[in-house]
Amino acid sequence: MTRATIDGRWESQERPGRMAGMKEVIGWALISFAALIAAMNFYLSFLRFHVHRFMGWEYRWVSGAPLLGSIALLVAYLFLPQPLTLWLAVPLSVIDTGGILWLLLTVFLMTFVWKKPDDGSAEQIRD
């Protein structure tokens, strides 16, 4: 319900901050989910092999959860204050090896750094 004030402005009589509080809860839940996914991807990419080798267990490659952490961080950016989200999102993006940052880094490295020299074999196939 709204009402007019003495100076002619309209103000709401509803509880202020109720929706803002819900947005923060959703934002923190998304940040927590992204942190969990980032930690799992980091463990699966870098730590799991060494743990299995140390314990003497058989090791099989297991993929993480690609892009889930990055998508959760992007959506959390809409719900939380931007400076806070930025300071949380940058470290989480760095350790989330299944995220957008690592995808772009891998594509760049495979295209420009780890590029195999062209030995002319492609030309022989076309002839």
Image: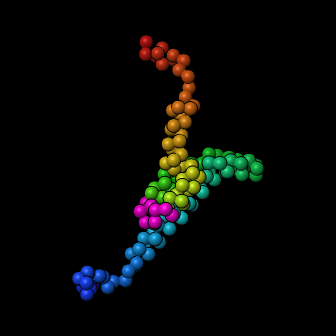
Q: Nearer the viewer, residue 100 or 17?
A: 17
The residue depicted at 54 percent of the width and 18 percent of the height is 119
In the rendered view, tell whether residue 18 sits above or below residue 36.
below
Q: With respect to residue 23, does 12 lie above or below? A: below
- The residue at the point 53 percent across, 20 percent down is 118
Q: Specify the segment rendered in magenta.
A: 75-84
Secondary structure predominantly adopted by residues drawn in magenta: helix
Q: Residue at x 53, y 31 (%)?
A: 112
**What residue do we see at 51% from left, 50% from top?**
99
Q: Position of residue 66 (x, y in %)?
A: 51, 50
- Image location (x, y in percent) of residue 91: 57, 55
Can residue 64 be seen in the rendering of this structure? no
Number of callouts: 0
Q: Quadrant of the N terminus?
A: bottom left
Residue 73 drawn in magenta? no
From what the image shows, is residue 105 above or below residue 3? above
Residue 82 within the magenta-colored segment of the rendering: yes
